[in-house]
Image (cartoon, helix red, strand yellow):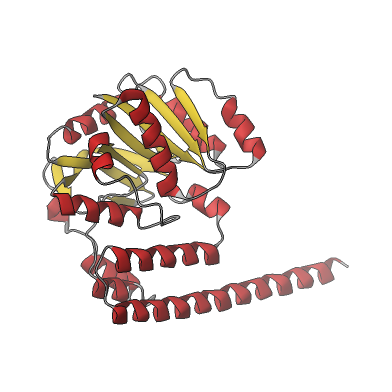
Amino acid sequence: MKTGMIIVNYNDYESTKNLIENIKKYQSIEKIVVVDNNSKEEEKEKLKNIKCRKLKILFQEENKGYACAINAGAKYLIGEFGKCNIIVSNADIVISEEKHIKELLKTLFPKDVAVCAPVILEGNHLNRGWKIPTPKQEILTSIPKLYKKMEKKYRYYKEEHYQEKESVVEVVSGCFFLIKSPVLEEISFFDENTFLYYEENILAKKLQKLGFKTVINNEVVVIHHHAVSIDRNINQLKKLKILRESQLYFEEKYNEASAGEIRLLRLINAITRGALKISLKLKNDKKERKSKKDATKKM
């Protein structure tokens, strides 16, 4: 099967251009599809000027989120190639060598494997997939003071899980992974009811239901400049709102959370958002006082 790559871009031309330059000579990738989520006009114009014979740019008229962008790119590739392997990538990814793509394609080859991913280096952190939390575990990890402790306890696999060349996991990061197009069609593509976050958990639930495997190749590493484009375009409060809305949708629609668990999550989310608002206001007030003080000194 041929292989195409989808790069989701939103006001991040430099990262997108760098990734295209990184991979455009890789013979294992026959097509590069950039799905632009309605960036600024000047960003769109810059994208149009990128020179690459493999490149197709799809301009979305509206930013409907990450899942919608992936679906647009995947449907284009399926229209071009029929059955194919699809690489999904954030713009802020670095792949050091083509052999990494070839190794991942080998990992994806077995019939029962639907999705595979490399180890993703994010700063000093290795992202190697995670477990789907139960609704009760989700509640505990949503409490700010308990977050780190509960996440380590419930979300991540122990180090010994990654001792072999490949490890089966429940979920892989949405920033970079490979999926077979027939599987994507069988699960009716990505659920477009989330704007950002929880796409990975939803995908994992769909794949589990059909008995497919998700695999990490522990010998392949790619670099992710984590949250570069997100932080540039979405403020903290809006990001938290989007995260919590996606969380509630996943828990209610896919993770069989009870009505009581949903109410509790809503309460925790409201308290967390209120606390963040207060924290941000205090920081802004402090900055304003400092600016006034500095201005007074200069007079």
Residue furthest toward the right? 299
**Image coords of residue 221 (percent x, y):** 28, 39
**Image coords of residue 95 (percent x, y):** 36, 33
Q: Identify which residue, 155 or 112, lies in the foreground.
A: 112
Q: Please name the residue shown 41% across and 57% down the image.
A: 194
- Relative to residue 144, is residue 103 drawn left or right? left
Q: Say which quarter of the image contains residue 59.
A: top right
Whether residue 45 is visible here, answered yes or no, is yes
Q: Say which quarter of the image contains residue 108.
A: top left
Query: Across the whole image, how many numbered discs are drawn on residues?
Result: 0
Q: Please name the residue shown 22% across and 69% down the image.
A: 134
Q: Identify which residue, 281 or 252, lies in the foreground.
A: 252
Q: Quadrant of the C terminus?
A: bottom right
Whether residue 29 is visible here, answered yes or no, is no
Q: Identify which residue, 188 or 257, lies in the foreground.
A: 188
Q: Say which quarter of the image contains residue 120.
A: top left
**Image coords of residue 245 (percent x, y):** 43, 66
Q: Please name the residue shown 56% across and 36% down the image.
A: 13
- Relative to residue 126, is residue 47 drawn left or right? right
Q: Identify which residue, 107 or 126, lies in the foreground.
A: 107
Q: Please name the residue shown 43% across and 36% down the image.
A: 7
The correct choice, above or below, for 242 with respect to 150 in the image is: above
Q: Quadrant of the N terminus?
A: top left
**Image coords of residue 179 (percent x, y):** 26, 38
The correct choice, above or below, for 257 with respect to 104 in the image is: below
